[in-house]
Amino acid sequence: MKNKWLIALAAVGIHICIGIVYAWSVLVKPIMAQMGFTLKQTTWTFSLAILFLGLSAGFLGDYVEKYGPRKSGLTSTCFFGLGMLGTALALHLHSLSLLYVFYGFIGGIGLGTGYITPVSTLVKYFPNNRGFATGLAIMGFGFASLIAGPVMQQLVARFGLVQNFIILGCVYMCIMAAASLYLAPPPKEVVAAQQKAATLAVHPVRQYKAREALCTWQFGCLWWIFFTNITCGIALLAVASPMAQEVVRMTPVAAASMVGIIGLINGAGRIFWSTISDYIGRRNVYIVFFTIEILAFYTLATTTTAFLFQALVLVIISCYGGGFSCMPAYLSDLFGTKELSAIHGKILTAWGLAGIAGPLLLSWIKETTGSYTTTLYFFAACFVLSLVIAIVLKWRTSMAKPQV
């Protein structure tokens, strides 16, 4: 049996590589300046990458279950590497359409496949700490921008945009390939023992197939609360810097520093909340998320001080990151671990759609009303609905008779 901590390290390695997508904003101005693209054209590249991340995770989850984490990890490596190198070609040719194809479509498939690859494996290595295990891997995705952002700034300044993608593409392919080759599920006898223990437990969990889970009302509820949390969180991420400068008059330097701290909190929130969920339960942690976010968004709409503004944004971002890391463990609580990668992939379609819906919704309301206030009140109202759904989900699943 392989060392579970090295398995966790391999999972973190993959997520730190693909999490480079969160540092896209660092490249927006250089691409606009050198390529002549508009802001809308450039940001659509990011939206497409998130869209195809969600869609590929949804459709390729069964592939991960069928062929295992090693082959799916190598598949992710190939798509992600091709996306990075193809992006270099697109920028060299000044082709917007090729940029969409390579970074958005091909790279997005690499992102989605790589995101779900280690999750099911880690849960099986840490059966008693599933929240911590999934948070450990997904934490890497949140922290990635802290590493990738400064590195890309230096590479672009020294070598240029095209060379930046060539260098990072080659480096990340090596890291992802090495990590993927080490990934392996635990021995069959260990998995069998875990399933037997689940059967004998006080609250046994039925091992659902992905198609069966998809048809349950519980999955629909989880999809919606996941979609809401990402839509509101990613919209705030998209405008954190200009919003800080406009609403509380922060300087561009101070706003940029806040964005850096956001990357830290995004990653730290993933491991913090997922670990907490092992003690208070996934049902309760989502109720805590939405209660906090209702109060935070409502207060953020009227705050005029920079300190309170930053504190509220960071609290929201911690819940945003925690929503990602707690979801795989929540799914395993309800549907078991037999086809967790496939079920997790299906729920990630919410991320793909939210990546487009959040920024578009915020920009539309902002342009219509002329301020961020209405948008923040609207997001608070969305979380009221999600809180109700989370409470109903807790009540109904607690009352339901377990199925084995």
Image (cartoon, rainbow, N blue to C red):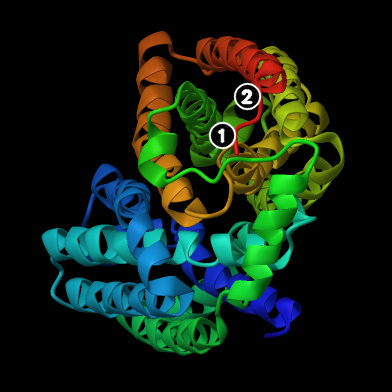
Between 149 and 247, the one nearer to me in the picture: 149
In the rendered view, does 62 fall on the left or right side of 397? left
> Can you tell which of label 1 and label 2 is closer to the viewer?
1
Q: Residue 291 location, x and y as percent?
A: 74, 18
Between 369 and 165, the one nearer to me in the picture: 165
Measured in 3D between alpha carbons, the distance from the residue under mark 1 to the one under mark 2, in whole angstroms, is 18 Å
Q: Residue 89 location, x and y as percent?
A: 19, 78
The image quarter in which residue 67 lies: bottom left
Q: Label 1 crowding class (10 Å Cα cut-off): few <14, some 14-19, many 20+?
A: many
In the rendered view, does 285 fall on the left or right side of 335? right
The image quarter in which residue 332 lies: top right
In the rendered view, does 21 fall on the left or right side of 383? left
Q: Amino acid at mark 2?
A: Val
Q: Which residue is mark 1?
A: 233
Note whether 131 is above or below 4 in the view shown: above
- Name the residue located 20 percent from the left edge and 58 percent from the top edge: 100
The residue tagged with tag 1: helix, strand or loop? helix
Quadrant for the C terminus in the image: top right
Q: Residue 279 location, x and y as percent?
A: 87, 41
Quadrant for the N terminus in the image: bottom right
Between 365 and 159, the one nearer to me in the picture: 365
Q: Which residue is mark 2?
A: 247
The residue tagged with tag 2: helix, strand or loop? helix
- Name the residue located 54 percent from the left edge and 46 percent from the top edge: 207
In the rendered view, does 319 fall on the left or right side of 220? right
Note whether 391 is above or below 97 in the view shown: above
Q: Are marks 1 and 2 in contact (CB under 8 Å)?
A: no
Note whether 299 is above or below 105 in the view shown: above
